[in-house]
Image (cartoon, rainbow, N blue to C red):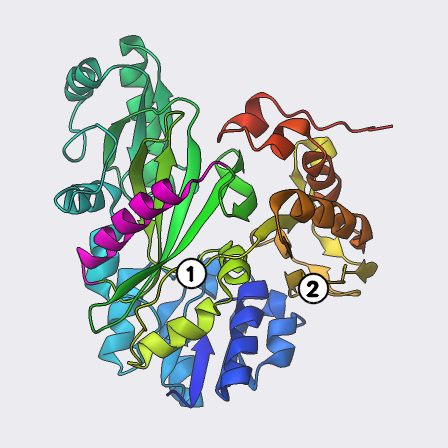
Amino acid sequence: MFDKILIANRGEIALRIIRTCREMGIKTVAVYSTADEKSLHVKFADEAVCIGPPAARDSYLKIPRLIAAAEITDAKAIHPGYGFLAENAEFSLICEEHNIKFIGPSAKMIDTMGNKSIARENIRKFGVPTIPGSEGIIRSADEAKKIAAEIGYPVIFKASAGGGGRGMRICSEESDIERQLVAARNESVACFASSDIYLEKFIVEPRHVEIQILGDRHGLVNHYGERDCSMQRRYQKMVEESPCPVMTPELREKMGQAAIAAGESIQYEGAGTIEFLLDRDHNFYFMEMNTRIQVEHPVTEEVTNEDLIKRQIEIAAGIPLDKKELKMRGHSIECRINAEDPEYNFRPSAGKIQAFHQPGGHSVRVDTHVYSGYTVPPYYDSMIAKLIVSAPNRMQAIARMKRSLSEFVIEGIKTNIPYQMQLMNDPQFISGNFDTKYLENHFKFQTDPS
């Protein structure tokens, strides 16, 4: 086992990793930009190294500075968390070249599954259902038109190197193709420095259901059930839950085995998530693989009683997984708490937190790096906390989430807590009958609920 791990991330995920490391008797090194000097992950780590100014490109994305921080502190492993460099094949390779264990998959695995078009072609060979579409990247508008005519409209362009909804454009008819292809390419170049675009059939009214997997270096891949991430706004997840409200044991078995097959196709090592689209008829299609821990991993931890971060670290140290039968208990829901103002189109709300009181009670968990007096910087993602609740069933979990949201006090900045509270009271959400476009097309936030 490692004596010391450097966490190449910030905020709540860095603090989450530090907590597990402390329980395992592993010392930790936090890295931070000058904007994050007062963050809890810096305070609670055994050591901390400043790696640059506030902008991520000058700090958290600077590979040489991260490697140098690991070397000067004698950290033998690096945990990348999520975001930033977590799915960067070059970072994984450079860690290996410096004899530092990257707690995650190899560069080859990241490359194989990180490019969506390549990943889709790879796992299709192993019998995993995929959405009909182009064989690879689209070379011209004429090629796109031909494929769209074969699979039928609507279709969607996607950036091969993309994520978070970037580089995606929907086409309802042939006249849309040229304009949307150009738009998708331009956004892909701007966000990912790649113009590679592929085409898929656009699934109408889908749910976003993902399967958590873990794979060890000995060839074993387990799955740990599903998460429903359909509550999205502009492709950004707002609420996640496990199990999926429409899941059946038979469907879970099929999706779980498909996820295992995807992991086994590349002899996957570490924590990963296989993301599927689930249509109205319960047909499911591979969408992409995330080769890292997910923001929403706590709901899986709550229903399986697994510490996924601990398992990541053990796998990286060569400890084999046990082949076990999936056992899920109760229901868990996570609400992302963001520093943003839902009354003004979710405008980011940086600034100093004047008062902070987090909810508590039975089966209530808050993952956060902020506190009263903390200043939320304007340079990073707006998420400042995750509120996770668990209960014996979904209705009780919703009731517990409503109670917990009502206790959550954050003053000095605006947050989306009122939005999340209204969503928990929404009849459609409560029914479990929704798709990935529900928030954008149907749910209306009331600025004055009274």
Closer to the eye: label 1 or 2: 1
| 340 is within the stretch colored magenta | no
Left or right, residue 362 beside residue 386: right
User: Looking at the picture, how far across and down is residue 349, in whole percent?
Assistant: 70, 46
Q: Amino acid at mark 1?
A: Ile
User: Looking at the picture, how far across and down is residue 429, in whole percent?
Assistant: 62, 32
What's the residue at 37%, 88% (across, down)?
A: 1
Left or right, residue 401 beside residue 246: right
Left or right, residue 435 beside residue 404: left
Q: CA distance from mark 1 to mark 2?
A: 21 Å
Q: Along the line of sight, which residue is nearer the eye, 390 or 170?
A: 390
Q: Amino acid at mark 2?
A: Val
Q: Along the line of sight, which residue is nearer the eye, 56 or 371?
A: 371
State whether residue 158 appears in this view: yes
Instruction: State the residue position of label 1.
Output: 293
What's the residue at 24%, 67% (across, down)?
A: 220
Secondary structure at badge 1 equals loop
Say which mark, if any, is on residue 370.
Answer: 2
Q: Is residue 387 above or below residue 246?
A: below
Q: Is residue 294 above or below residue 116?
A: below
Residue extending farthest right: 450
Q: Residues within 10 Å of mark 1 (few under 14, many from 20)?
A: many
Quadrant assignment, res 425: top right
What's the residue at 76%, 62% (across, down)?
A: 360
Quadrant assignment, res 370: bottom right
State whether residue 8 appears in this view: no
The majority secondary structure of the magenta stretch comes to: helix
Q: Residues within 10 Å of mark 2 (few under 14, many from 20)?
A: some
State the extent of the magenta-drawn residues as a range.
Answer: 246-267
